[in-house]
Image (cartoon, helix red, strand yellow):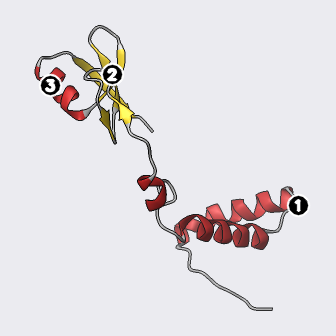
């Protein structure tokens, strides 16, 4: 049976002991958990960024800016001073910011 070692700094010792204690309490094999983690990590990252792969990016539908009603790859949820929240493109956000109408850009629409 092969044996693998990995380096952990002294500051990691407490975390490692806690991990081993939890595995023991849950009657789980720490080695099995590590193997499973490595296999899942490889599966997710083997083809690139696990959040957005190139294939996914190419097939993403465009989203409508609710301000100018045009389609864009990226639109953001924006909270305006009137407390209205809209999906807006970068150009509309910049224009509205210059007029002092934007309270906050909330998030990118996925």
Marks 2 and 1 sit apart, C-alpha to C-alpha, by 53 Å
Work out whether residue 99 or residue 27 is closer to the camera in this orientation and state it: 99
Mark 1 residue element: loop
Q: Is residue 100 left or right of residue 8?
A: left
**Can residue 42 be seen by looking at this rendering?**
yes
Asked where in the image residue 102 lies, by quadrant, the reply is top left
Work out whether residue 96 or residue 41 is closer to the camera in this orientation and state it: 96
Residue that badge 3 annotates: 95
In this view, the residue farthest toward the bottom is 1
Q: Earlier in the sequence, mark 1 or mark 3?
A: 1
Q: Residue at x 48, y 54 (%)?
A: 56
**Can residue 53 be seen by looking at this rendering?**
no
- Measuring from the top left, give residue 14's x and y in whole percent: 63, 62
The label shown at residue 63 is none
Mark 2 residue element: loop
- Measuring from the top left, give residue 52's x and y in whole percent: 47, 54
Residue that badge 2 annotates: 66
Marks 1 and 3 sit apart, C-alpha to C-alpha, by 59 Å
Q: Residues within 10 Å of mark 2 (few under 14, many from 20)?
A: some
Q: Residue at x 60, y 81 (%)?
A: 6
Task: Check contact, mark 3 vs mark 2: CB within 8 A.
Answer: no
Q: Earlier in the sequence, mark 2 or mark 1?
A: 1
Q: Residues within 10 Å of mark 1 (few under 14, many from 20)?
A: few
Asked where in the image residue 98 lies, by quadrant, the reply is top left
The label shown at residue 27 is 1
Q: Is residue 100 left or right of residue 9?
A: left
Q: Residue at x 43, y 61 (%)?
A: 54
Q: Is residue 68 left or right of residue 4?
A: left
Marks 3 and 2 sit apart, C-alpha to C-alpha, by 14 Å
- Measuring from the top left, give residue 31's x and y in whole percent: 76, 73
Quick one: quadrant of the N terminus?
A: bottom right
């Amino acid at each position: 049976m092969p044996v693998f070692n990995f380096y952990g700094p002294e500051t990691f010792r407490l975390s490692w002991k806690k991990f081993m204690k939890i595995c023991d309490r849950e009657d789980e094999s720490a080695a099995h958990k590590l193997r499973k983690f490595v296999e899942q990590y490889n599966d997710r990252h083997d083809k690139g960024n696990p959040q957005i792969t190139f294939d996914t990016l190419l097939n993403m539908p465009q989203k409508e800016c609710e301000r100018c009603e045009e389609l864009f790859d990226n639109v953001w949820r924006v909270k305006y001073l009137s407390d209205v929240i809209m999906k807006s493109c970068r150009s509309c956000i910049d224009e509205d910011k210059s007029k002092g109408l934007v309270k906050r850009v909330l998030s990118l629409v996925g």
